[in-house]
Amino acid sequence: MPVADHIRKLGFRRWHERQLIEAHASLVTAFLGVIMVAVCMDQFHWREAGIKPLIMLAVMAAGIALCFKTVAFYFKALFRAEHFAAQAVCGGCGVYGVIEVRTSSVLALQELPDAASGDWLKVRCKKCGHDWTMSADHTQTPIAKSL
Ligand SMILES: [Zn+2]
């Protein structure tokens, strides 16, 4: 589901909060993966007969893959949340995160296939009615560019 639909459904502040919760839950999962790898390394012995060393290697590989996947998700979700949060302050009244999504590039493309270019959200402040456009391309943030 596109970000615009999530923000529309939950509201910006709740969406942002959920992004942070999901990001940090994935970070906890990464730490559990590290613990899983460490325990398997401790219990791993090449000279042991049977299938146990192979199972240990498979679990270690799965733990390492889990760590990479969840850390990547952590940074992606965190950058996305930070990217939108930086643009969620109303230029009219200065209130943070009290917005409604009017339309987005994804919705515009569904209605008019050649109408939109780029990745954006058109939002409106619920407090004062000020309109502005948020860039939805979170890979263009200064932090994301430096990685
Ligand atoms: Zn406002």
Image (cartoon, rainbow, N blue to C red):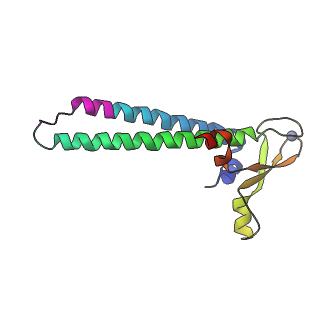
Image quarter in which the N terminus is found? bottom right
Residue at figure coordinates x 71%, y 39% from the top left? 85
In this picture, residue 31 sits left or right of residue 93: left
In the displayed image of the protein, which residue is found farthest to the left? 49
Asked where in the image residue 78 lies, by quadrant, the reply is top right
Residue 145 position in % (x across, y down): 63, 43
Can you tell me which quadrant of the image ligand 1 is in? top right
In the depicted structure, whether residue 19 falls above or below residue 132: above
Residue at figure coordinates x 15%, y 44% from the top left? 51
Residue 28 position in % (x across, y down): 46, 32
Q: Is residue 146 magenta?
A: no
In this picture, residue 63 sits left or right of residue 103: left
Residue 9 position in % (x across, y down): 68, 49
Residue at figure coordinates x 71%, y 44% from the top left? 11
Q: Nearer the viewer, residue 146 or 71?
A: 146
In this picture, residue 75 sits left or right of residue 15: left
Residue at figure coordinates x 29%, y 41% from the top left? 59
The count of marks equals: 0
In the displayed image of the protein, which residue is found farthest to the front? 146
Residue 33 position in % (x across, y down): 38, 36
Asked where in the image residue 42 lies, by quadrant, the reply is top left
Image quarter in which the C terminus is found? top right
Q: Which residues are magenta?
A: 37-48
